[in-house]
Image (tube, rainbow, N blue to C red):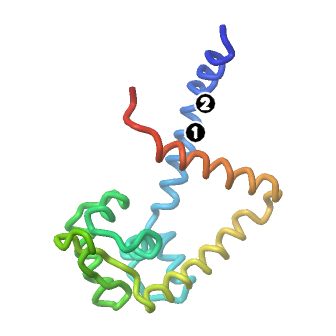
Amino acid sequence: MSTNHVHVAHIRAQLPNLHRALIEIVSIMNRPDRDAAMVAAAGLRLDSALFPVLASIERLGPIGVVDLAGRLGRDYTTVSRQVARLEDLELVSRQNNASDKRVREATITAKGKTSTDAIDRARERMAVQAFANWASEDFDQLTRLLGMLADAMGASTTPE
């Protein structure tokens, strides 16, 4: 058996463990109570359902609602209403896309950036606590490997 076949067999054997771990991580990160705790730790009064929308606009914006909804795994109409609510709160603004006037893009406002900065500080405090007992090398390796995973998943196409 070639080395490549052994490697592929190893990957196949470990994939269920990786998949379970990723599902657990995504489940933890998607819990509304975690978002609410982070928003509260940031000293903000913001509906926890709006938090991922705001954070995504800050990280990815300017971004159209259709693209944003796809990235969040939510219905377009729901995200459109949430963006409108964030606009009412003066945390985001919307403008026409420069190349396609039919597309309205959301972008963070100064007030919204102040809010996401506060959330980032709260997230940092929570992460420092979670990783406090990790060796620096382990944390660095995790960061490197997750970056590799994100790149590979982003580059992958449909299953063969």
Say which residue appears at 77% left-offset and 66% top-offset: 132
Say which residue appears at 43% left-offset and 69% top-offset: 60
Secondary structure found at label 1: helix
Say which residue appears at 45% left-offset and 61% top-offset: 30
Q: Is residue 135 left or right of residue 60?
A: right
User: Disc 2 residue type?
Assistant: Gln
User: Disc 1 residue type?
Assistant: Leu
How dense is the environment of label 1, judged by Cα within 10 Å: few (below 14), some, or many (20 and up)? few
How dense is the environment of label 2, judged by Cα within 10 Å: few (below 14), some, or many (20 and up)? few
Note whether 160 is above or below 27 in the view shown: above
Q: Nearer the viewer, residue 93 or 17?
A: 93
Q: Nearer the viewer, residue 26 or 59?
A: 59
- Give residue 18's mark: 1
**Residue for badge 2:** 14
Query: Residue 147 in the image: x percent, y percent?
Result: 61, 52
- Distance between the Cα atoms at labels 2 and 1? 6 Å
Q: Is residue 95 left or right of residue 149?
A: left
Query: Residue 92 in the image: x percent, y percent?
Result: 35, 84
Find out whether the residues at labels 2 and 1 contact each other: C-beta distance under 8 Å: yes
Quadrant of the rendering where the N terminus is positioned: top right
Secondary structure found at label 2: helix
Say which residue appears at 71% left-offset and 70% top-offset: 128
Note whether 15 is above or below 130 in the view shown: above
